[in-house]
């Protein structure tokens, strides 16, 4: 992907708690400008959970799933259920990066084109959704948005974004069990066309993420604020 001709830092953070995962992604956005390079994070969940978009109402999404904890994301989008069959990743871009200057539709298209090409490299044909499928409003994997990723007509990948003066954060979810592709194979394919290196996590980052998770993402005050 030409826009990632710059160095891409890759962080394989493994499984974390739902609150910590969201806190880590928020910190990637906060620190994007200071880091000055794009970061791709591959991560998983240490328990079943659900996340929902920053602008959604807690009372509404709580009726859509029985999964708990139910955590408000730092990005927009709809309800996503996280289990052992889901792959999650995030991307953080600093303000000078070409992706930060894209309109939301452009960056959304670019990230799913990247994911599409990775599946193609794995021998699986997937396609971008050409139009909005208005089914299951508020739920990410019911219906589809334009440029979501489809396999045999069913949505298997979606994403949510947040763009501000600090940078651009993309949180992506891939539900690829039906494709038969292994996660490690897909992650390797994602990196085939990138100029990348492993990210050396700054010493204070883990502690800051833990504090933010406890003070914000694990609290009812944040998750039920609207």
Image (cartoon, rainbow, N blue to C red):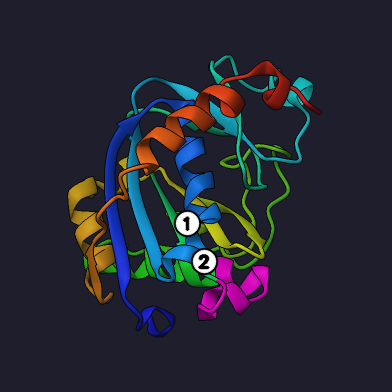
Image-based side of 172 in relation to 4, left or right: right
Q: Nearer the viewer, residue 222 or 102?
A: 222
Assess whether mark 2 and mark 1 are in contact (beta carbons under 8 angstroms). no
What SS does tag 2 mark? helix
Q: Please state the extent of the stretch shown in magenta in the rendering.
A: 95-108
Image-based side of 30 in relation to 162, left or right: left
Residue at 74% across, 22% down: 224
| Percent x, y of residue 213 | 51, 28
Q: Nearer the viewer, residue 87 or 12?
A: 12
- Quadrant location of the C terminus in the rendered image: top right
> Where 177 falls versus 66 (above or below)?
below
**How much space separates mark 1 and mark 2, taking CA atoms?**
33 Å
Q: Residues within 10 Å of mark 1 (few under 14, many from 20)?
A: many
Q: Main secondary structure of the magenta part?
A: helix
Residue at 45% across, 58% down: 91
For residue 177, say whether it is visible. Answer: yes
Q: Which residue is mark 1?
A: 150
> Where 151 falls versus 222 (above or below)?
below
Residue at 36% across, 37% down: 206
What SS does tag 1 mark? strand
Q: Nearer the viewer, residue 6 or 59?
A: 6
Report if residue 97 lies within the magenta region: yes
Residue at 24% across, 47% down: 183
Please report whichever mark, 1 or 2, sits nearer to the chain's N-terminal start. 2
Image-based side of 43 in relation to 106, left or right: left
Q: Residues within 10 Å of mark 2 (few under 14, many from 20)?
A: many
Instruction: Write down the quadrant of residue 220 in the picture.
Output: top right
Q: Which residue is mark 2?
A: 33
| Percent x, y of residue 22 | 51, 37
């Amino acid at each position: 992907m030409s826009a990632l001709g710059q160095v891409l830092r890759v962080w394989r953070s493994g499984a974390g708690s739902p609150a910590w995962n969201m806190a880590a992604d928020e910190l990637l956005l906060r620190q994007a400008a200071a880091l000055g390079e794009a970061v791709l994070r591959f991560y998983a969940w240490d328990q079943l959970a659900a996340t929902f978009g920053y602008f959604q109402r807690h009372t509404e999404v709580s009726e859509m799933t029985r999964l708990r904890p139910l955590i408000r994301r730092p990005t927009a989008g709809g309800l996503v259920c996280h289990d052992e069959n889901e792959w999650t990743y995030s991307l953080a871009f600093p303000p000078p990066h070409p992706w930060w200057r894209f309109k939301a539709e452009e960056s959304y298209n670019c990230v799913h084109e990247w994911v599409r090409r990775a599946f193609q490299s794995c021998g699986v044909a997937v396609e971008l959704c050409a139009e909005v499928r208005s089914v299951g409003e508020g739920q990410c994997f019911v219906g589809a948005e334009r440029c979501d990723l489809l396999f045999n007509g069913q949505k298997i990948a979606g994403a949510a974004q947040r763009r501000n003066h600090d940078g651009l954060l993309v949180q992506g979810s891939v539900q690829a069990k039906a494709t038969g592709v292994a996660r490690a194979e897909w992650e390797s394919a994602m990196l085939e066309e990138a100029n990348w290196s492993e990210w050396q996590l700054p010493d204070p980052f883990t502690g800051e993420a833990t504090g933010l998770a406890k003070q914000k993402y694990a609290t009812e005050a944040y998750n039920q604020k609207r």
